[in-house]
Image (tube, grey):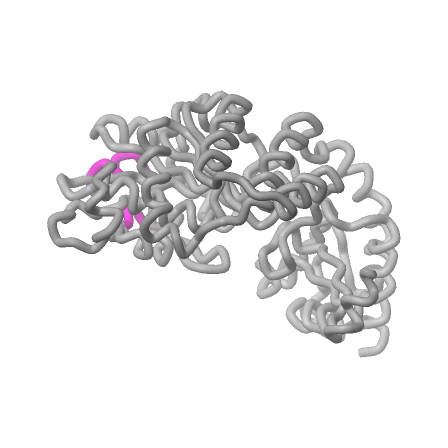
Amino acid sequence: MTDDVYQRYSLKHVINASGKMTILGVSKVSNTVLAAQKVGGQNFFEMAALTEKTGQHIAKLLGAEGALVINSASAGLALATAAVIGQGSEYHVYHPNAPRFNKREIVMPKGHNVDYGAPEEVMIELGGGQVVEAGYANMCTPDHVDMMITDQTVAVLYVKSHHTVQKSMLSIEDALTVAHKHGLPLILDAAAEEDLRKYVQLGVDIVVFSGAKAIEGPASGLVFGKQPYIDWIEMQTHGIGRAMKIGKDNILGLTAAIEQYLQDGPEDGEHMKARLAPFLTALNEVPGLTATQAQDGAGREIYRASVKVAADAPLDAKAVTAALKSGNPAIYTREYRANEGIIEFDIRAVDEGEMAQIVARLRQIMEEN
């Protein structure tokens, strides 16, 4: 059946060595998650009750006051923004752009206003917010955030991601302290993070996760945190959130994925390093390449192969990544540092056989040019 789909639509097979990326469908789901989706897809529910009860169940699992399954982390950012602007106003739900709601500023570090596949500021603006950047591209301190807060500010936003500037940045705890000093909530974009309980324990008001990344659920998102804010977000699902609704199959699928994730957890760092070692050895045997182990830039227990393409190699790193994607199977890598001559290979979704295919394709590319 799998091959039939690729043949029917003339699609290439893909080896995903880039990580849990939206452009490739993010993650594979388990049979447990698929079974939950099947139950959802083949039965009817009172959707308001399904949303409420699964949210309560997830909140209890995470130690949060409230939780809500939504259709994506991006939707979570937009809905959270609308929620802190409307602050529980039913009028706002139906008239989100009404001038009476003149407090719309969301303060965030300049180095966090990144493009993760879409810009952070687009999601904030979609929710009716106005981005106010604090600090500089290479530095943001608690004082930088504090000085940008005015009587028009409705929240502080912090983005925990490898996409953001890492050096000279205030911590989540710092941002939380500044926000609470002014009686404001902290919205945390933690879309690809792995610890579902950590940020609630820190006291973060609104946490936004992707359901399909670390958790390996279906296309979905999760917002959780303090009850008043989650209630306000739920209200917004009857307004702008109608365009972002999630189906019953994916609500149950994500709920099952969270249960499984909390039980089994992600692949641990030591196991990942052990799987990575023979791959690094094989990569180092390819002419023109030097491979080393590298940890995730945001500090997660994720280890990757960092491959340096020699300056005198027949192709530069950008050309190598393009050649990898052009074949069948298409091999996708992490290209963020290709301009520096470095290609990263994320092995979380790559098995031993696929690693051998990657090495063989790299050898072919380097020897044919």
Left or right: 182 with respect to 114?
left
Q: Quadrant of residue 40?
A: top right
Name the foreground residue: 200 vs 253: 253
Looking at the image, is 7 positioned above or below residue 333? below
In the rendering, at what x and y percent does residue 255 appear? 59, 35
Residue at 45 percent across and 59 percent down: it is: 118
One can see residue 296 in this view: no
Q: Quadrant of residue 33?
A: top right
Stretch in magenta: 133-147
Residue at 86 percent across and 49 percent down: it is: 352
Is 138 inside the magenta-drawn segment? yes
In the rendering, at what x and y percent does residue 244 appear? 43, 53
Left or right: 189 with respect to 262?
left
Is 116 inside the magenta-drawn segment? no
Quick one: which residue is furthest to the bottom in this view? 369
Looking at the image, is 212 positioned above or below residue 198? below
Residue at 63 percent across and 56 percent down: it is: 25
Name the foreground residue: 63 vs 192: 63
Q: In which quadrant will I find the C terminus?
A: bottom right
Q: In which quadrant will I find the N terminus?
A: bottom right
